[in-house]
Image (cartoon, helix red, strand yellow):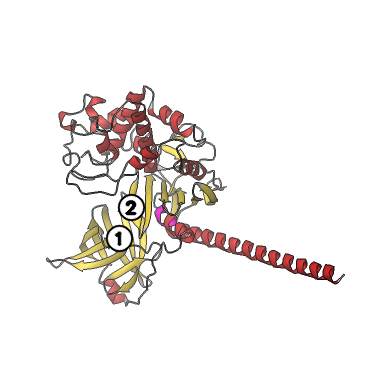
Amino acid sequence: MHTRIASAIWHTALGRLWLGLLLALAANTRLFADEVDAFVMAQMAKQHVPAVSIAVLKHGKIVKAKGYGTANLELAVPATPDTVYQIGSVSKQFLAAGLLLLVRDGKLGLEDSIRKYIPDAPDTWQPITLRHLLTHTSGLLRDTADLQFVEHTDMEVIRAAYASPLLFRPGEKLSYSNVGYFALAEIIARASGKPWPRFIDERIFVPLGMKSSRTTTNEELIAQRASGYQWADGRYLNAMSAPGLRASGAFLSTVRDMARWDAALYSDALLTAAERELMWTPVTLNSGAAQSYAFGWEVGKVGEHRLLHHAGTMLGFRSDISRYVDDGVTVVTLSNAFGALPEKISSGVAAMYIPGLQPRRRPAKMSDAALDAYTGKYQITQGMLTISRSEGQLVMDMAMGPRTIRMGMLTPEGKDRFFDEDNPRSTYSFETDAQGRLNFVMRTESGKESVRGTRLSPGP
């Protein structure tokens, strides 16, 4: 009898212990989920983004997929993991994968000249190979400006670039070129014998079950499609729509479909291990210097964490996929605002799943007068950067055409040194050059200079 009573007490106590542990685990899970949700929603408010959908994956399996905010403001449609967004230049990795499938089929070679497939291209383009096109080392200009907002064919875009001299000898430098990816799309069509959208659909989207992914269209009805917006003068406006199909930012997708793509990159479901390795190998210039771009992917490190990623921009949309390959963690962020910074959201969410990903920074106080010494307009490669002061921080705004994008808020860390609390890996400093001009400098964790700009005029 005593044994039975003792056993019952033991099992009751054990059950209560397990119940307590399960409740604690559930509470921690909810707390963690709330932390991610709170971060995403805070970033949306800072960046003025109506809708964001994210997917977080571990080794190709979804651990979180959620939509936030409003996919269509006029109809009050909430965002979900199945909301369809334009993904912009994230599309380039699908064209790169399609090209590798054709290499496997024996229908083209990476060292083939562009003129093998587009024979009326200028003689000066003869040294340009498909590898150059994939890695933005061709010397072709970035865009053909006259065709940005008119209906066009791929060949019209390519031929519009014929009259422009190459920016450098192929393989000499890395300079991002959307025109190069128009050429790749045309080459895929000619080598496969079918329109390139159909080829990508048949060889990538259908086999992987990416049922919501397809080429962009303004005419066809797309279920659960998000509308694109821009923030201007304190309010949301409908973003313009690019007419026609841009091969350099071709596709629509969802975070669930992008999760299927991520899962396929852990296996031979689409590309072999050798093909995937080739796709992620950084390009080497003629000088022997390695760069940070591969085939439709940017390749780098965050501290000791290897990162494969790419962002995308279309009118009214911005996107990001970040794969921390050694950690087995991927974050996909899709948004419906031209001024969004999905890269910040991806990196912040990833830091919640990867211990030690973000460095610890130590804020310092700085007087308004000291901060004002750095304000003004700075000319950087990407455009005009305006730096102003607000509540003990410096504000970075970038002019993009007629609109302005809030790039970040800089917190003082010491004299002339700042960091962005939302993405603390980089260090921002202000340095005076030999001519006495103030320069804005952004450096990576390793100390490598990534952005430099000279102040043209002081603030406010």
* Magenta stretch contains residue 342: yes
Residue 444 badge: 1
Residue drawn at the location 26% of the way across and 53% of the way down: 383
The quarter of the displayed image where residue 279 is located: top left
The residue shown at (25%, 64%) is 376
With respect to residue 192, does 417 lie above or below? below
* Amino acid carrying mark 2 in the image: Gly
387 lies above or below 186: below
The amino acid type, in three-letter code, at marker 1 is: Thr
The prevailing secondary structure element of the residues shown in magenta is helix
Task: Classify residue 1 as left or right of residue 333.
Answer: right
Q: Position of residue 201 (x, y in %)?
A: 45, 31
Find residue 48 and report its image quarter.
bottom left
- Image side of residue 216 versus residue 19, left or right: left
Quickly name the residue at label 2.
300
x then y, percent, for residue 346: 44, 54
Q: If you read the primary sequence from the N terminus, does the residue marked by circle 1 or circle 2 appear first?
A: 2
Task: Using the rendered image of the protein, determine whether residue 69 is visible from the camera's viewpoint.
Answer: yes
Give residue 190's quadrant in the image: top left
The span shown in magenta is 340-345
Above or below — where is 114 with respect to 354? above
Q: Is residue 376 above or below residue 335?
A: below
Dot 1 surroundings within 10 Å: few (below 14), some, or many (20 or more)?
some
Residue 456, image x and y in percent? 20, 61
Q: Quadrant of the N terminus?
A: bottom right
User: Helix, strand, or loop for circle 2?
Assistant: strand
* Viewport quadrant of the C terminus: bottom left
